[in-house]
Image (cartoon, helix red, strand yellow):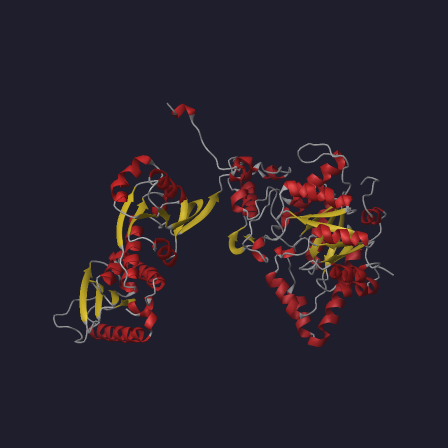
Amino acid sequence: MNDITYSNLHKILSEGKFAVTAECGPPRGANREVITKKLELLKGNVDAVNVTDNQTAIVRMSSIAASAQLVDAGLEPVMQMVVRDRNRIAIQSDIMGAYALGIKNILCLTGDHQKFGSQPDAANVFDIDSINLIKAVKDMRDKGKDMSGHELDVAPQMFIGAAANPFADPFEYRILRLAKKVEAGAGFIQTQCIYNMDRFGEWMKRAVDAGLTEKTYILAGVTPLKSAGMAKYMNNNVAGIEIPDGIIKKMEDTPKEKQVEEGLKMCMEDIARLREMEGVSGIHIMAIEWEAIVERIVKESGLKK
Amino acid sequence: MITGEQKPVQEILEIVKPYKNILILGCGTCVKTCFAGGEDEVAVLASALRLAYKRDGRKIQVKEFTIERQCENEFIQESAAEVAQCDAVLSLACGAGVQAMAKRFEDMPILPGVNTTFIGIQETEGIFTEECSGCGNCELANFGGICPVTRCAKKLMNGPCGGSQDGKCEINPETDCAWNQIIDRLTKLGQMDNLKKIIPPKNWNTSLSGGPRKLVREDHII
Amino acid sequence: MIKKDRPRITIFYCINSFRQPEKPILEDCDIKYIKMPCSSMTKDVYLLRAFEAGADAVMVLVCPEDACRYAEGGKRARKRIEWVRGILDQIGMDGERQLAIYNIVSGDDKAVKEIIKKTLEGLKEIKKSPEKHV
């Protein structure tokens, strides 16, 4: 990996430090205050914050706007961008705009199908896929040209990330796809939240064996479980999330009022185990609508002092 | 073949409401195969409409006629006499047939009785699947004969996405993940190398996105 | 609305499952019989035209499923009855009460009588709901 670092997150990772990122979902409206409150809970506790892009196809304030708000408040955003809603014209336009607003990290995603969201009647776009998005951002950065070959007056110098799901199928092909993302230009990877440590360990080993951890930084995703109900719901209803029966049972066997603590305990144990895994460069905490817990997780697990 | 489904009877009743004398015109090709608008379906619909009107105490004259194809003049001509005798034609052809009729009979309301859906095949008896979206730039050779533009819900060129689980697509547990199928097929064919390189973004200019298309064969124009 | 004193029933029957009786099965209704060489001859358009011709209810009599002489006749007929029921419901009629298929063992006139009685009761039920008048 070369010496130029494109953002603070990139710098931390390149210095071999274990990075911590969290997530911030914009509001379903134009209320800046929602973001202000969330970033106050996260500032100082994490190295960068992912700002989601109409997650689950539910219409929310745009990722670029919310990310710009983070920049103004001195907190580094990772702007998420899905290819579901924008064609290559809007995509390139937004990347240039984002960089001009001080946004230096981008996470390139496919996006959940609109069938799941608040506007299932909308036409989707999917003009280009996430891998071609990664490549487009990389070419803008490294070649200084847009997708049509036009030379950019200022080329956006962004740190490019992609998502990876070690629990989606087909398992064998996932490493090949990860390799493609890295080749396209993904400098960091954030995984879907992990509960099956053994399966994740297998996937990490394959990534290491394929030499991918020498070309990209992998941040392991975690989400603390709040209840047995949440565990069961996520396992059955959310695509790409696998929660082993043992964990669900453990939550079920815990009395209701103690389940939150048990979930946090398991999360900390997972973080400890992930820190020791070869090739894992950081943790990505997805505490959905529970930004308040991030500080505690980060401090109690020793990720931050 | 082109697939379609007959509109719900209630919707058809609304559509034909202004007219007292209608001709239900069927087509003997694609819509017959998918049981939407062939001769038999024309007969059933005619009967249902007459029954519905009878129950409401209203009057309607419903005539039935079917031609081989509603997208070709040669056959459309055969319906001219029947068309002349009605106030409106309820066409059970695909959208192309309805419009072909409308172009030829400019003074006659031509109404659609079928919702045209896709280009597809009869997978097994009674089951039809969408296969082709007419992108105008076929890359099936790269994908082992499985179209990611049509059969992947996200039109991915470098799939699958993270929502693929147990070989099924995230949008519906009964929908196969096209990328899972592509990987299986290419593995069988020993062509997995096709997927090693990054497949570039599709040129959508040749698809409907580029505007309604026209095919001109000069060699067939005298 | 035509006032009818006696309900009218049309019975389509497979000749292997039923034989038309000489005397009427029931006195308080008019029954029209249509025979078919096989239950698979039950066509959607014939059922609808029976209603157009004035039937209040249509019944289809076929052999028991594993006793069909042509193996699948009864099964196919059942599917078509389901389809036409859907159409009847769509136009505001009562698919379930006005159209039904029954598996009959040849000679079981008692069963047929019971079915007709049940159908007539169904028609009475419909008369009670004004929106579904026959």
> Where's residue A132, x and y in %?
65, 41
Q: At which x and y percent is residue A160?
A: 74, 45
**Left or right, A166 with reference to A159:** left
Kindly identify the residue that appears in the image at 70 percent across and 36 percent down.
Answer: A146
Query: Viewer-proximal residue, A277 or C97?
Result: C97
Q: Is residue C114 above or below residue A153?
A: below
Q: Total marks drawn?
A: 0
Residue A204 visible in rendering? no
| Residue C105 in picture, x, y percent from top left | 23, 69
Q: Quadrant of the C terminus of chain A?
A: bottom right
In this view, the residue farthest toward the right is A305
Q: Is residue B9 left or right of residue A276?
A: left
- What residue is rendered at 75% in x and 52% in y? A67
Residue B157 shows up from this direction: yes
Along the line of sight, the residue nearer the viewer: C105 or B34: B34
Question: Which image quadrant for residue C77?
Answer: bottom left
Image coordinates of residue A139 in percent, x first then y, are 72, 36
Image-based side of C6 in relation to A233, left or right: left
Q: Residue at x 78, y 54 (%)?
A: A70
- Residue extending farthest to the left is C22
Placement of A139 over or under B25, stated as above or below: above
Image quadrant containing the N terminus of chain A = top right
Please tell me whether residue C105 is drawn above or below residue A87 in the rendered image.
below
